[in-house]
Amino acid sequence: MMTEVYYVEDDKDIAEGIRNYLESKGFKVSVLQCISDAKQTLMKKVPSIILIDRNMPDGDGADLCRWIRHRQGNKLPVLLLTVRGETADIVGGFRDGADDYVVKPFEPEVLHSRINALLRRAEAVEENNLYCDHFSLDKRRASVFYDQEEIILSQSEYRLLLILMENKGKTMTRGQLLEAIWDSNGNFVNDNTLTVTMKRLREKLHQPSCIKTIRSFGYRMEDTV
């Protein structure tokens, strides 16, 4: 499966050169020539990594970076490309949410190495972090966050959320959830226990639209933004 790259760049010659080079290395590259196009495309599909030029005809690429962080959290690697090489610009780029910063002009080989490094880092993080819409779950710390706010869950609420997130896109029956969360500990519970736990979980997560009730069957988690 090819790694998909979005490249936000309005200079057609630069964009074509970088696209040709990265595609020769096995990447699939989509060039987006303005910030508005990038936002529309990101709302339909999220790539493996996005490269953003700061000087765009309809705004600053750093604004797009902040927009991505608000919608996607930290799961999408962002690399800013720019002619602005002053320390303040670089520090500002990281503050706006960039994972790396490459100053123009640069050698394609350097860009390729930076992309690979970010992808390796993202893969390692992805193994321990799960995401859906505005909240995330860190398996190592057993922590849940809504945007940047930590949500305190009970053990059963956390395990219910974990199972749904690990099976995102798949409908889990009430029986499967009851068995996995309670019966595995030798505890006898009735069906109402799951209903009450789900109600409390939804309240703590601000009634997320990504947790779907499948009537008379179970629950499913799916991305909605």
Image: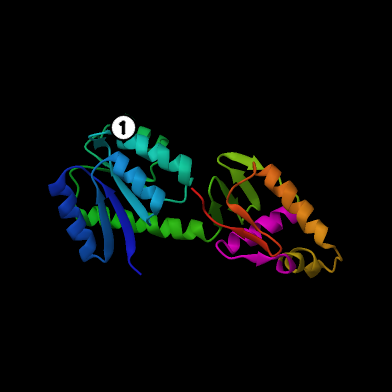
Residue 42 pos. (x, y %): 38, 49
The furthest residue to the front? 215
Quadrant in which the N terminus is drawn = bottom left
Residue 80 seen in render: no
From the image, give the main secondary structure of the stretch colored magenta.
helix
Q: Residue at x 75, y 63 (%)?
A: 181
Residue 165 falls inside the magenta stretch: yes
Callout 1 crowding tier (Cα within 10 Å): few <14, some 14–19, many ≥20: some
**Coloring applied to the structure:** rainbow
Furthest-top residue in this view: 88
Read off the residue under disc 1.
Answer: 89
| Residue type at the position of mark 1 | Asp
What residue is at 41 percent from the left and 38 percent from the top?
A: 67
Expressed as whole percent of the image width and height from the top left, the position of residue 64 reads 36, 38
Residue 15 appearing in the image: yes
Q: Considering depth in this image, is 142 or 4 the residue closer to the camera?
A: 4
Which residue is at a point 78% across and 52% down the rendered structure image?
196
- For the image, the number of numbered tags is 1
Magenta-highlighted residues: 156-176
The residue drawn where x is 81% and y is 57% is: 193
In the drawing, does residue 223 fall left or right of residue 50?
Answer: right
Q: Quadrant of residue 173?
A: bottom right
Q: Position of residue 93 (x, y in %)?
A: 35, 36
For residue 121, side relative to residue 34 (left or right): right
Residue sitting nearer the eye, 138 or 215: 215
Q: Pick whichever, 116 or 5, lies toward us.
A: 5
Q: In the rendered view, tell whether residue 85 sits above or below residue 20.
A: above
**Residue 44 to residue 93: above or below:** below
> Magenta segment: does it hold 21?
no
